[in-house]
Image (spheres, rainbow, N blue to C red):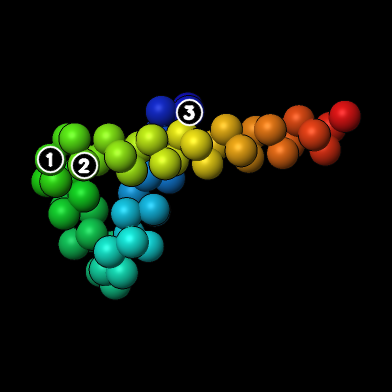
């Protein structure tokens, strides 16, 4: 599940960054970009998820 969540978060970050209005076109561009660049978006998504999980844990305490 986290893999899909990371992938979709990475795509959402890319889409916001690129400001592409057409989601299908944005998805195609995202999937065609070099893996090294896509990995940067995955790293940002993982960082966001860690912050979200830490925030949730803090609220549960």
Quarter of the image for the C terminus: give it. Answer: top right
Q: Is residue 7 visible?
A: no
Residue 43, image x and y in percent? 38, 35
Depicted 52 relative to depicted 13: above or below: above
Q: How far apart in space, not on screen, are marks 2 and 1 (Cα)?
A: 6 Å
- Mark 2 surroundings within 10 Å by alpha-carbon count, few (fewer than 14), some (14 through 19), many (20 or more): few
Residue 49 lies left or right of residue 20; in this view the side is right
Q: Is residue 18 visible?
A: yes
Residue 60, image x and y in percent? 84, 32
Please name the residue shown 47% across and 27% down the image.
1
Depicted 16 relative to depicted 6: above or below: below
Mark 2 in CB contact with mark 1 (< 8 angstroms): yes
Please name the residue shown 73% across and 36% down the image.
56
Say which residue label 3 marks: 2
Depicted 32 relative to depicted 3: above or below: below
- Mark in the foreground, 2 or 3: 2
Residue 31 lies left or right of residue 21; in this view the side is left
Q: Earlier in the sequence, mark 2 or mark 3?
A: 3
Mark 2 in CB contact with mark 3 (< 8 angstroms): no
Say which residue label 1 marks: 34
Say which residue label 2 marks: 37
- Mark in the foreground, 1 or 3: 1
Residue 12, image x and y in percent? 39, 53
Please name the residue shown 33% across and 43% down the image.
41
């Amino acid at each position: 599940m986290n893999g899909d969540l990371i992938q979709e978060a990475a795509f959402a970050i890319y889409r916001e960054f690129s400001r592409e209005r057409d989601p299908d076109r944005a998805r195609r561009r995202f999937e065609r970009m070099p893996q090294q660049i896509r990995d940067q978006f995955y790293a940002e998504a993982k960082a966001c998820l860690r912050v979200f999980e830490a925030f949730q844990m803090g609220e549960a305490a």
